[in-house]
Each structure stands twice: as C-alpha cells, then as structure tokens.
Amino acid sequence: MTLESQSWRCSNGHSFDRAKEGYVNLLPVQQKHSREPGDSAEMLGARRHFLEAGYYGPLAQAICAQLLLNAQGENPVLLDLGCGEGYYARKLAERGWSPSNIYGVDIAKAGVRLAAKKQSQANFAVASSFHLPVADDSVDALLRVFAPGPAEELVRVLKPGASLLDVAPGPEHLWSLKTRLYDTPQQHTAPAPVPGLELASELRLVFPLNIETNEAVRNFLAMTPFAWKGRSEARELLEQQNYLHLEADFLLRRFVKPASASE
C-alpha cells in the first residue's frame, strides 16, 4: 500500500482514509467477531497508565536492545504485531529507530487510536494479525508481545534473513499473584516454536515488580486477564491494596527467516 495525501491506496485501487488521529482502519467487517473487537478502551487506558509509569521498563529496555542490535540495513522497517497503545513502538523510537519506519497493527481500534495520537510520525492500522495488510517479504523486524498470529503470516511478511522478536510470559510470571487468585494456579507452559523460522537466541528476563500506589495496582489488575478471572473476593481485596510486590518473568525469543525461504 502507498500513502497518498491522507489516504492509503492498495494495488487493487482501493482507498482507505486516515482518521483525524492519524491511523487507518483496514479491518473488514467479515473479520470482526464483535462490535468492538480486541481489548476494551478501559483495559487499554489502564495499560497505558501502568506502562508509562515505568513498571515494565526492564522489559522495554530488553526489547529495544534486541531489536536495535539485530536491525538490518540503513532504514529497517519494524512491524509491531498487536501494538495496543503503542508503548514499545514509542520506546523504540526514543532509542533511535526512525518513526516513519515503524508500523503497528492491532484489532482494537481504541488501542490504535491511542498509539497514533501519541506517535504521529509512525504508521498504525486497525487490522487482524491473522490477515496482515502487509506485502510479502517487506518487514525487517517483527515484534510480537503477548499477541496471537499464525506462523504462516509471520513468515510471509518477513524479509529473508529478517527476524521476529517474540515475547511471552516465563513460567513464574506473576506467580505469587496467581496463588492468591486461583485455587490451583498453573505455571505458564513453554511457548511453541514458530514453524518456518529458526530460533536464533533466547533470553529469560526476571525482575521484581513492586507496584506502590493503589491507582497503579488497579491499573495493573484492569489491564490483565485478572480483571475477570480468579476468585472475585480475592480480586476485590487486591483492588484495595496500596502496593503489590510481585515477580515479572518474561521469555524473549528471536527467530530468523532463512535466506532460502523465499527462493
């Protein structure tokens, strides 16, 4: 797709206007399974406040370091899959990645709207990660943080030799919180490999997560599945806390598309 004035135009001649916030809606009606798919505006707002308070700062630093270290070419193109409110894309731009070469997609319009308002020079679209509106072999770096997406689409959009940085919860992520909410808490299972891509590196990142205001505690609970899962009485008690001392556990895996994949 090419940008012409305030519209994106595809090779088939279809035109998609940019919203006043700067994003474009590329999600066909047939790919919507509800009136407003994806995370709610309330959940996205809570996540934005929590992330901007710096609680996941070590994760953002690790993501930026990995992407910048392995960037290809002079003007690499990044696609943030399931970008939400665009926090990690903004952090990457702050570290020197050209905003005009940052693209983000999410099925939640509220998240994409927030991302576009916060980072006007980047490119954000409402779209499904299962049907990416992205050309074959066009992406230098693909970021996926807790986001779904079929392996075939990931392989399709990556250039040969380009990489995917996949971020998933480690086995003990928020374990002490789970023990308070669930009768039989389960550790996170190891994430599956990505068919068609080769594992190049794996990093486990563990750090203390000390949430020290009631507002931050509420934002944290609201942005996670804990907002509706687990024992309701335990969750209500947690919402009254002025601090939570937890443990963050993430697994960062870098995959590379073989140079022969598109030959």
Image (tube, grey):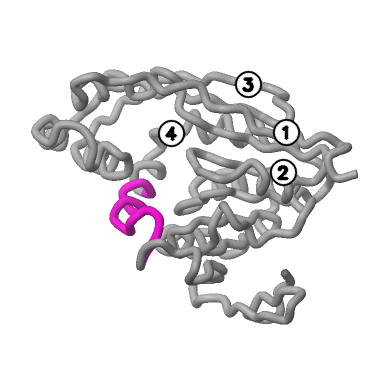
In front here: 124 or 186? 186
Q: Earlier in the sequence, mark 3 or mark 2?
A: 2
Quarter of the image where one finds residue 263:
top right
The numbered mark, 4 or 1, whose residue comes first in the sequence reads 4
Cβ atoms under marks 1 and 2 closer than 8 Å: yes
Q: Amino acid at mark 4?
A: Tyr
Q: Please indicate whether residue 134 sits to the left or right of residue 171 in the image.
A: right
The magenta region covers 36-48
Q: Are marks 2 and 4 in contact (CB under 8 Å)?
A: no
Residue 80 position within the rendered picture, expressed as x and y whole percent measured from the top left: 59, 49
Residue located at (66% from left, 75% from top): 8
Mark with earlier residue (1, 3) = 1
| Residue lying at 83% horizontally and 47% vertically, measured from the top left | 74
For marks 1 and 3, give the CA distance: 14 Å
Foreground mark, 4 or 1, reads 1
Gap in angstroms between the C-alphas marked 1 and 2: 7 Å
Residue placed under numbered mark 1 in the picture: 197
Q: Secondary structure at mark 4?
A: loop
Does residue 23 appear anywhere in the picture?
no
The residue under label 2 is 155
In the rendered image, residue 115 lying in the magenta stretch gets the answer: no
